Amino acid sequence: MLFLGIETSCDETSLALLEGKVNSGLSFYEQINNFEVLGSLTSSQIKVHQQYGGVVPEVGARQHAEQIHWLFEQLLVKTIAKSKKFESRDKLLTSISDIFVTAEPGLVSALRVGVEFAKSLKFFLEKEFDHTVNLDYVNHLSGHIVSCFYQKRLDKDELGLVSCDNSKGGARYAQNNSSASFDIFPHLHLLVSGGNTQTILLKDSYNWEIVGQTLDDAAGECFDKIGRMLGLPYPGGVNLAKIAELKEENYFDFPISMYKSDSINFSFSGLKTALRYFLQEAQVEGFVIQRQLSNVEIEQLAESASLDLSPKLQFIKKVAISVQFVVVQQLCKQFNKAVRQLSPRSVGLSGGVSANLLLRRKLAEIRPQKVLISQKELTGDNAIMIALAGTRKKTLAKNKKLS
Ligand code: KG4
């Protein structure tokens, strides 16, 4: 059986083909890892949105519409070239049993492109090959969560990044995953993306409950907004992390919200406001950030120790290090509190911000729980995670029918 995943919720058009069987006799972890990624292609719109300083929904939707058919054709070609089983286009197309597409949450105009494509493809496949194709709608966040359980190593061949500039590698900190099966539930999960920061308790593969969340901005949103104040191009989080490296310093005593309270929620808008006032004061002292930094300046910031830089760049580097440290501290401290309260058997990390190396390192230190961290290739929006989340829905439906 072949499962096609489709993701167009924001600024990445992504398609993936997975092969495997839904087997209700397997544990959730075994089931997820029972699937093989035959091929995946992701086209990033970052370069398009950079000129506006953030995602413009209508522009994004047009990009998805322009990319998705071409991407699908490329995925077919790539899969046929890789897998001997599918010697022809028709053979491959007739093997698609399920289409899983992101339907929420996301930008409505962008989501619609994926959903309409999925519906048309189902119609075409059923008409042309006279077999039933299952189409199901997937929650984007469940995709992020499920991605941390997929621990089969993805090689470059399986991943196609058509135009993505945030793929600079880094160590993975996924741990304790060598054995094919272990008890993961209850599992406590930290999902950190551009639009969401949530702690979710997974009692089992079906019962999932949000137990903590941001009261205002998401962590990624906070990174992006502060990145913009510092003159970094969109997405600020990616560039801020590049220049902050793995340093653990809070040079300017920026506030770490929430952690003195009993709450396990998060809050990032205080840091954003503190930064605004801090930069205004710094401006009075002569540190004026008037324009977007050039790529050369960003490379310089990424590669040089603070002291080798001009005073202005030194200042930006120190702010970036402090901001990253404060955000990661809050995420880990709040999540740790939740871990202590709920005593899960395993913990997990996913979402775009989980590409952050300092966050990965700090979260991996949580003991004695088993730590499952999404492979770096699965942290951003991608269709592999959507196909995996779709198979979870299918397995649950199958189990329900059997019981
Ligand atoms: O999950 P995602 O790709 O999109 C949403 O569904 O929101 O997350 C995008 C977010 C952006 O805010 C981006 O700045 C942030 O993830 N991000 C990072 C890093 N890589 C991506 N933030 C901090 N450090 C990174 N290495």
Image: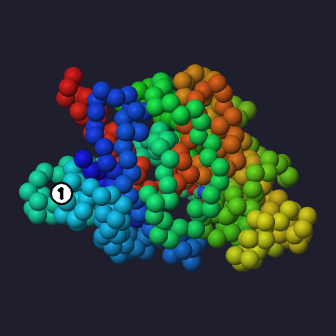
Residue placed most toward the observer, 283 or 391: 391
Q: What residue do we see at 36% from left, 35% from top?
A: 31
Instruction: Describe residue 136's horizontal placement relative to residue 354 as left or right.
Output: left
The reply to whether the residue tagged 1 has its Cβ within 8 angstroms of ligand 1 is no
Q: What residue do we see at 70% from left, 48% from top?
A: 358
The number of discs equals: 1
Instruction: Describe residue 26's horizontal placement relative to residue 92 as left or right.
Output: right
Q: Taking 31 as reference, is 317 above or below it?
A: below
Q: Quadrant of ligand 1?
A: bottom right
Colouring scheme, one of rainbow, by chain, secondary structure, one colour:
rainbow
Task: Tell me, yes or no, if residue 104 can be seen here.
Answer: no
Label 1's element?
A: helix
Task: Tell me, yes or no, if residue 392 can be seen here.
Answer: yes
Q: Quadrant of residue 344 in the image?
A: top right
Q: Quadrant of the C terminus?
A: top left
Q: What residue do we see at 28% from left, 33% from top?
A: 23
Residue type (three-letter) at the residue carrying disc 1: Thr
Q: Position of residue 178 (x, y in %)?
A: 53, 34
- Residue linked to disc 1: 94
Residue placed most toward the observer, 30 or 192: 30
Assess disc 1: are there few (<14), some (14-19) or many (≥20) residues with their C-alpha within 10 Å of its C-alpha. Answer: some
Q: Taking 46 as reference, is 278 above or below it?
A: above
Q: Quadrant of residue 272 in the image?
A: bottom right
- As drawn, the residue found furthest toward the front would be 84
Residue placed most toward the observer, 398 or 271: 398
Instruction: Describe residue 335's horizontal placement relative to residue 82 as left or right.
Output: right
Q: Position of residue 323 (x, y in %)?
A: 74, 53
Q: Position of residue 131 (x, y in %)?
A: 11, 53
Q: Position of residue 88 (x, y in %)?
A: 22, 65
Q: What residue do we see at 47% from left, 43% from top?
A: 152
